Structure formats: C-alpha cells, structure tokens
Amino acid sequence: MDREQRSNWIFEVLSHILKALGGNSRIRESLIFKGAMVLNQHLGTPRMSLDIDSNLDAEFTRQHPDKIVQKTFLEESISEALTRYFEDQDPVRFKVSHIRVEPNPIKGHPLGWDAFLIRISLIDYEKLGVRDLPGLRVDVAAPETLSDDSVVVLPLGDVTVKAYSLERIAGEKARAFLSSLPAYREKLDKRPKAIRVKDLYDLTRIIQARPINDKIFWKKAGEEFFLASESRYVDCEGLKTFRENWEVTSRLFSEDPIIPTDISIADVENTLVAITDYWESINLLPFSFPLPG
C-alpha cells in the first residue's frame, strides 16, 4: 500500500469501527464521540480522518473511578462490540487480531486528565496478500465540563452513539487548536507539539454550513468554546491568540497532505476574524483560566 491507499483503508475501516461501537450498549454508556468522524455526520460531507476521537463520559468515571477498572471495561467492551459486528457481516471481511488499551499519558497526567489510547489491529480477508496493514486508533480523552447543548444522540445507520453537538464541536475545534500553540504548551510546561491545523479546516467547514449570521448557533458555539477551554485552562484574548505563530500555521496548513484544497488559509483567516469578532461583541471574549494551585 502507498500512503494514499493506507489512508483510504484506515478511513474506511474506522467508519465500520464507529458503527460497531455504536451497536454496543456498554460503549454508549462510557464514551462520547467527537472529532472529524462525527463532524462528517453532522455536515453530511466527508473529511479524511485517521483516528476516532472520544471522551470518557463523566457519569461513567464517577461510577468507575479506578483507572484499571476503566481500562478493563474498555478492552472487554470494544472487543465484544467489534467481534459481534464483524461476525454479523455477510460475507465476513474483518477479524479482530489484537486490541490494546494504553493509559495516556503512560505515567498519568499531572492535572488529572488521565485518558486512554486504544490500538486495534485487524485481519482484512480482502487484503490477505498485503503485509503490515496499518494499525487503528481510538483516542479517549478525560471528561470535560458539558452543558445541556453539548451532547446529542447521533444516528449511524441503524445504530446511535452519544456525540458532541455541532455547536460543541465548533467550540472544541477552536479550543483544540489553541491548545497546540506555544503559549499554552508553555503554560502547562509541556514540550512543543504539532500545531493542529486540521481543526482550522474543520472550523471553516462549520462556518460555511452555518454562517456567522446564524447568531443562535454561534452564541451556543461560543459558550461551548468557553466551557471546553475552562476544562483545560486554555486562555483566549481574541484573534491575537489564534494568530500566534501564524507564519508556521499557514505553512503547515498548506503542506498537510490530509487537508483538502477546497479551503484556503485565507478562508481560515476570514473564519477566525468573523468568529472572534462576534464572540467579542457578545462579551464571550476575552477569558483566562489560571492553573490550580
């Protein structure tokens, strides 16, 4: 497989995995899905994604506070969900080879944001001659503060999952981008990380579907941005914060092989100006959250 073939295979199989997880009642109790896979469902348009993003449900963690219990629960539930889903297919194409649930970060998070990385290996009977099929991953983040508008029941064919609403995804995308910038990494005394330019692409997809003159939507999205940022102590002064290291962001956006070319960096800049201007006009910006202690 070349890189494009690998990416297409991962995206196809992840779509199956998300439906498999939606068909398991235990998973529906424990995980809330988000990210590009969920955004595609909200907008009805595809964007290549190479993983599945989720959060632990806060009620699940209250009932099962022990991390080892959570890890075991996820291993057993995901194995059960995938095995049943794949065995029900006719003809059977996939078989679970290996599932591993890893703490993330390995040594625990200093602020208690302990989560998991789920690695999945499958056998694909249509590609038995292909060596080293890509591994698949489901990211499971720690619970966040949510509102009544944060979560919806999202249909995936004949099953459903708990998922972030479009308003929450808009807010979470803005927060996730800021959390990758140098100022926030320095605040948490963390090493630099890759700037999350794909979140800017997704944010622009959202504003194209829900223009800024949809004031009710963008007010709720701004409130969700505030809650998501509060959950992770992310500060925002406005457009200035989004434009930190903008030359690097622009270059990475243009070079990213996963990002389609239908949205330009100029479109992204217009999106950020429109959103931050509106959020400032309704006094949602600026805000800051000091670290505890």
Image: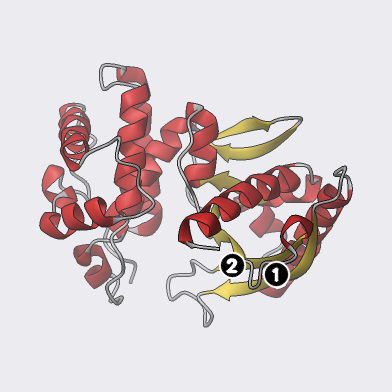
> Taking 93 as reference, is 291 above or below it?
below
Crowding near the residue tagged with mark 2, few <14, some 14–19, many ≥20 C-alpha atoms within 10 Å: many
How far apart in space, not on screen, are marks 1 and 2 (Cα)? 8 Å
In the rendered view, does 30 fall on the left or right side of 45? right
Q: Is mark 1 on a helix, strand or loop?
A: helix
Residue lying at 75% horizontally and 58% vertically, measured from the top left: 78
Residue annotated with mark 2: 116
Q: Position of residue 201 (x, y in %)?
A: 32, 42
Residue at point 47% right, 55% down?
Answer: 4
User: From where the camera sits, is residue 226 visible?
Assistant: no
- In this rendering, the answer to whether 215 lies above or below 175 is above
Residue that mark 1 sits on: 71
Quadrant, the N terminus = bottom right
Q: Residue 129, how many percent across, how many down?
A: 72, 67
User: The residue under label 1 is which amino acid type?
Assistant: Lys
Q: What residue type is labelled 2?
A: Phe
